[in-house]
Image: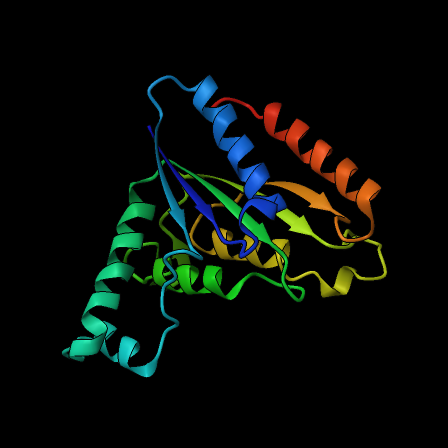
Amino acid sequence: MKLLHLDSSVLGPHSVSRQVSAAIVDRLRQSTPGLEVSYRDLTLTPLAHLTGSHLAAGQGAAPEASLREDIAAGQAVLEEFLAADIVVLGAPMYNFTIPSQLKAWIDRILVVGKTFKYSAQGAEGLAGHKRVIVALSRGGYYGPGTPAAAGEHLETYLRWVFGFIGIKSPEFISADGIQIGPEHREKAVAGALKAASDLNAA
């Protein structure tokens, strides 16, 4: 069984989402003998954002020489995703949504004919056999019924994206309120780490 571990926080060792995603992977390593883990740091090896030239190449045009390396990198992350049985993703909220580095990765895995297809019934996901676990960190509180709920475009976006490619039940472990104060941060991190340690085996 293969696990793909991704982090997208720019905060390095100070990142809560990185801490929690690592705890999730540790839990799955312990509970799944022979688990093969690969890791990608989306901030240390960022993908370029899509341009018109990328899209033209995707439609069959000969890629510009300057794009060839980046297109190869995009193909590599797509193949990495397709090969994974489990995906563990560290995703902090930046300005109410996902980091741009994570968006660049998503743009490379949402590929028609690979992770979804169109039919007479509309779009159909092709990656539904994967287990996806997301470690979220948010500075405030954005749950249903909170004053800031309408500004939550992290979990809601990722839930929609993964659902679009067939993963209807992604799992989320959240550390919320980490910027409100030290006590809030400590409690949020402890709760998220406990949830990671209680995860069901792969």
User: Is 64 on the left or on the right of 80, as rendered?
Assistant: left
User: Is 15 on the left or on the right of 27, as rendered?
Assistant: right
Query: Whole-percent x and y of residue 18?
Result: 55, 43
Work out whether residue 45 or residue 169 is closer to the camera in this orientation and state it: 45
Vertical position of residue 130 compared to residue 195: above or below: below
User: Is 59 on the left or on the right of 132, as rendered?
Assistant: left
- Who's the residue at 47% across and 25% down the image? 28
Quarter holding the N terminus?
top left
Vertical position of residue 165 compared to residue 18: above or below: below
* Residue closest to the far bottom: 52
Answer whether residue 155 is visible to the viewer in this image.
yes
Answer whether residue 121 is visible to the viewer in this image.
no
- Who's the residue at 40% across and 59% down the image? 105
Displayed quadrant of residue 34: top left
User: Is 201 on the left or on the right of 156, as rendered?
Assistant: left
Query: Whole-percent x and y of residue 164?
Result: 47, 56
Query: Whole-percent x and y of residue 55?
Result: 29, 77
The scheme the figure's colours follow is rainbow
Query: Whole-percent x and y of residue 72?
Result: 21, 62
Numbered-mark total: 0
Quarter holding the C terminus?
top left
- Who's the residue at 60% across and 47% down the image? 15
Displayed quadrant of residue 61: bottom left
Vertical position of residue 42 compared to residue 95: above or below: above
- Who's the residue at 39% across and 61% down the image? 46
